[in-house]
Image (cartoon, helix red, strand yellow):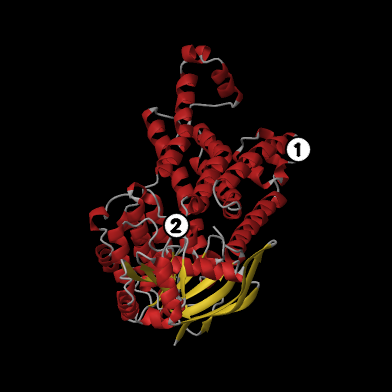
Amino acid sequence: MKQQLFAVQAELIKNRRSKIVWVTFIAFALAPVMGGIFILIIRDPEALAKAGGLAAKVKAMGFQPSWNSYLSVLTQAVGVGGVLVSGFVASWIFGREYSDGTAKDLLSLPVSRTKILNAKFIVYMIWSVALVISNLLIAFLIGTILHLDLVENIWRGLGEYFVTTVLTILAGLPLAFFAIWGRGYLAPLGFVSLTIVIAQIITAIGYGSFFPWAVPALYSGAGGEYKADLNSLSYLILIVTSFAGYMATITYWKFADHTK
Amino acid sequence: MQIVRTDALSKRFGTTTATDGISIQVEQGEIYGFLGLNGAGKTTLIRILLGMIKPDIGSVMLFGKLLTPGFDQWNDIGYMVETPYAYPNLSVKENLQVYNKLRGLKRSSLVDQVIEKLKLSNYRDVKARLLSMGNQQRLGLAKALMHQPKLLILDEPINGLDPEGIVEVRTLLKELSKNGSTIFLSSHILGEVAKVANRIGIVHQGKLIKELSIYELNEQLLKKVIVQTNQNLKAVHELASVNHEAVLTEEGEIEITDRAAIDHPEYISKFLVEKDLPPKQVRLFTEDLEMYFLRTIRTKS
């Protein structure tokens, strides 16, 4: 347990000076800022008339200047953008050791290879959760300034927000394998981009609920009526895929020949 | 006590044989120099010793224990494989703190001690990406030495160091060996290996083709007496007449290769003076490790 804690601390030291941390927080913060802009537009008929495409999008979403509607936008941002941002985080945490040339220094240590990877998975989860909480805090600030209304109980929306977060984190776990197998962050980034494209196509043809990387977006409501397609099997497929990705990462790292 | 022992280690990558039946033993306190051309199999062997690559055939024993995934003496081993890299955005101190944590070391003062030892004090808070190549090498060595290991496995430890750094590392390695640490190092700077190693192994095309102590190496290095006079041809005849193995080279020098001349070059000088052929130059030439190494691998090829 102590070793695991030390490994997590080491992983945190590695990331504390990374500019990439701030890049992910700033990129993800676009969601509450955009939500704030939606609120301003919808409240101002003149701005709504001038906003053109953006106004059409706001209307299509049925967006209301309320906490519930704002939270719904944030949840959809986690379900869609979160898969990309979390994928980026996972690619960085696991792939950087190869691009920095430090992977070889992690292989012959008293702390086991599994614990080193677990530390990375833990930091990936902490980072992802910190991102969604950060967005929530920014949204709280913007919403308070804009005096949003509370039309119904907020807890249900918050619940969906955090469930979407969990689903998004699960969808990012298999990327660790691609980072280690591809010895860098290009392979996982390529993979996450591919999953986003495939998720669009599969959802459009009606099978999105069976594609693990589409599940977070569908659950968040970003796919509109397709959310109704989700069932126990959808979540099971996502959980099995995540677990398989985790196990493949551990097994590969433990048993493959490390020549780089 | 045998600190490192390998038995018939073989590893292939596709059709390439990286190591072919390598068996070596390194005793406690020994500095073992591992020599070979690029691609000879040095780094593969080092990675096998560190459990990074699994051999197809053969086994590794470290500290008398079979190297398996459950091997538990990694804190007795320090290592540096190929070019040392560090986390570029972390300072020297932070980089060492990462390994201090990963090794579960109780004393954080070890970080400061090793910074001091490797003369990195002026760079303690400098980001690794801003370090010169020599200082990156020092940081790599600091990572390997911080936990005061009993066995050091170093791949090209003096790469990129300036002459002062090379002398410092040489002194450091000798000091560690004197205090009982065992050192296994590979280097392409053969002369440097000869200055620190007690024993050397030469690997070529994945095979260990020669293993000998520095004493045996000195015995095997080619030696000859080089002489120049104003009448070299006559001098060769006079030397041959008293059974010296003397030949005139294309460079216009007399080479004498018999044992008596090598042991007592002053007698050659005296003899030539007596024959009214006073030498302009008499010197004992000893083959260096580079030449010995190339001669050895050419012979084996």
- Tell me if B23 is positioned left or right of B273 in this view: right
Q: What residue type is labelled 2?
A: Thr
Q: Nearer the viewer, mark 1 or mark 2?
A: 2
- Considering depth in this image, is A160 or A240 the residue closer to the camera? A240
- Tell me if B116 is positioned left or right of B1 in this view: left
* Residue with the mark numbered 1: A206
- Considering depth in this image, is B257 or A94 the residue closer to the camera? B257
- Considering depth in this image, is A213 or B139 the residue closer to the camera? B139
**Point 58% across, 49% down: residue:** A172
Indicate the chain on which mark 1 is placed: A
x, y (%) of residue B115? 27, 62
Indicate the chain on which mark 2 is placed: B
**Point 69% across, 37% down: residue:** A226
x, y (%) of residue B154? 43, 67
**Image quarter (top left, top right, bottom left or bottom right) of the N terminus of chain B:** bottom left
Quarter of the image where one finds residue A249: bottom right
**Point 58% across, 26% down: residue:** A62
Label 1 residue SS: loop
Q: In this view, does B103 lie above or below A224?
A: below
Q: In this view, does A198 lie above or below B154?
A: above
The mark found on residue B83 in the picture is: 2
Count neighbours of disc 1 (C-alpha within 10 A) and say few if under 14, some if 14 to 19, many if 20 or more: few
